[in-house]
Amino acid sequence: MREALFERKSGAPGEHEKEIYAVPLSLPARTAEMFLSAVLIWLRQAIKALAALFVFATLLPLALGLALGIPTAQVFGLISSTVVLQANAAFVGVGMGMHPAAVLMIMTLVEVGTVLAILFVCDAFAIQSVRVRDMLRRTEEKMQRVPYLAKYGAITLIILPAMPVVGLYSSAVIGWILRWDRGLSLLFITIGWVAVTVSLILVALGFVRVLA
């Protein structure tokens, strides 16, 4: 239990002798302090997550759209579609008549911002939850028994964004749980995301040509 230190003067007036004694903090005070600490941690991680989303999933796509002359409404439509539909948003972008390269770049920026935001939120759980920290510790111990998987396992994230059951969001969580290098995880998820998005853009262009 934490203790609060207080000073008490002793001796005759004018003397500077002091006695230090400790008074345990009350349980409500300790609980309030723990609650405040948890709130600050979540607030810090939330700010990081929102900053990643704002920069990569909003600001940069809008700047790109402005540079390429794409209407802001279409950019916002593609951003929101990517968040909801993930890679299938390629059909929305192509259907709105946007250039395939612009669709790919905007969707990839949204993907990067989303993955970073998910990782920051996962970090908040690890900081706050003893159970989550124990799970990560056990996972890391198991990973160390298979050096090859620990070193090269992140490469498997290339194929996960294309899997219907896994998708983008689960890929980020899997990479975080398995304690793979964050930079490599983001890189391989992005490579997989670009591959599946390009394939869906080609399919969408085929549909557009057939309907035309």
Image (tube, rainbow, N blue to C red):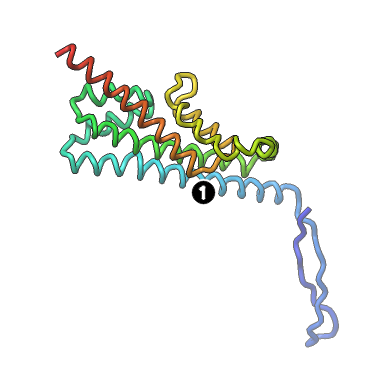
Q: Is residue 170 left or right of residue 3?
A: left
Location of the C terminus (image quadrant)? top left
Coordinates of residue 38 in the picture (x, y in percent): 61, 45
Above or below, 54 against 198 in this view is below
| Quarter holding residue 35 | top right
Decide if residue 40 is on the left or right side of residue 115: right
Which SS class for mark 1? helix
Q: Residue at x 81, y 71 (%)?
A: 20
106 or 46: which is nearer to us? 106
- Residue drawn at x 49%, y 38% as measured from the top left: 185
Instruction: Decide: is 44 above or below 99.
Output: below
Closer to the camera in the image, 197 or 148: 148
> Horizontally, is 164 left or right of 30 in the view?
left
Residue behind mark 1: 44
Residue at 77% in and 59% down: 3
Residue 102, compared with residue 29, is above or below; it is above
